[in-house]
Image (spheres, rainbow, N blue to C red):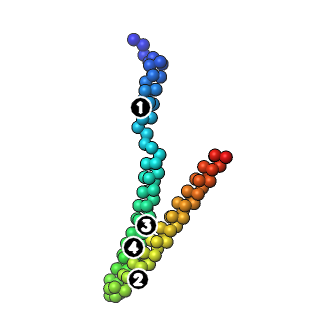
Amino acid sequence: MTDEPDPERLKALEKRIAALRGDREEPPHQEKAYSQAQHVWRMVIELVTGLLIGFGIGYGLDSVFGTMPLFLVLFMLLGFAAGVKTMLRTAQELQRKQEAADAAGEDERD
C-alpha cells in the first residue's frame, strides 16, 4: 500500500461533501428575521436596564434619606426616559446601517 491518497477519490469526496453542505443552508429570510429579533431584544433590554438602574438609585436614596416613594418614583421616571432615549438612538443607528446597505446594493446594480 502507498502512503499517498488517491487524488481522484479525494476530489470526488470533496464534491460529495460540498453537495451535502449546500443542501443544509438556511434561506436568507430566516437569517434576516433572526437579526431583527436580535435587535428587538437589544432595545427591550436597554429599556428594562434603564428602569432597573433608576429603581436602584431611587430606592437607595430613599433608604438613605427616609423619603420612601419620592426618589424611587423620580428616578424610575428618569430611568424610563433614559431607556427610551437609548432605544431611539439604537433605532436611528439601525436605520442608518439599513440605508447604507440599501445604497450599497443600489450601487452594485447600476
Tell me the residue that label 2 is attached to: 74
User: Mark 1 vs mark 4: which is more N-terminal?
Assistant: 1
Q: Secondary structure at mark 3?
A: helix
User: Which of the two marks, 3 or 1, is nearer to us in this view?
Assistant: 1
Instruction: Identify the residue shown where x is 42% and y is 79%.
Output: 77
The spot of residue 41 in percent (x, y) is: 41, 61
User: Mark 3 vs mark 1: which is more N-terminal?
Assistant: 1
Instruction: Identify the residue shown where x is 39% and y is 78%.
Output: 76
Q: Is residue 91 visible?
A: yes
Tell me the residue that label 3 is attached to: 46
Q: Secondary structure at mark 1?
A: helix
Q: Secondary structure at mark 2?
A: helix
How far apart are labels 3 and 1 at the CA level?
Answer: 41 Å
How far apart are labels 1 and 4 at the CA level?
Answer: 49 Å
Q: Is 82 in front, or is 92?
A: 92
User: Mark 2 vs mark 3: which is more N-terminal?
Assistant: 3
Tell me the residue that label 1 is attached to: 20
How far apart are labels 3 and 4 at the CA level?
Answer: 9 Å
- What residue type is disc 3 on? Glu
Number of other residues with Cα within 10 Å of mark 1, as a class: few under 14, some 14 to 19, many 20 or more:
few
User: Which of the two marks, 1 or 4, is nearer to us in this view?
Assistant: 1
How far apart are labels 2 and 3 at the CA level?
Answer: 19 Å
User: Mark 2 vs mark 4: which is more N-terminal?
Assistant: 4
How far apart are labels 2 and 1 at the CA level?
Answer: 59 Å
Residue 90, placed above or below residue 70? above
How far apart are labels 2 and 4 at the CA level?
Answer: 11 Å
- What residue type is disc 2 on? Leu
Total labels drawn: 4
Tell me the residue that label 4 is attached to: 51
Number of other residues with Cα within 10 Å of mark 3, as a class: few under 14, some 14 to 19, many 20 or more:
many
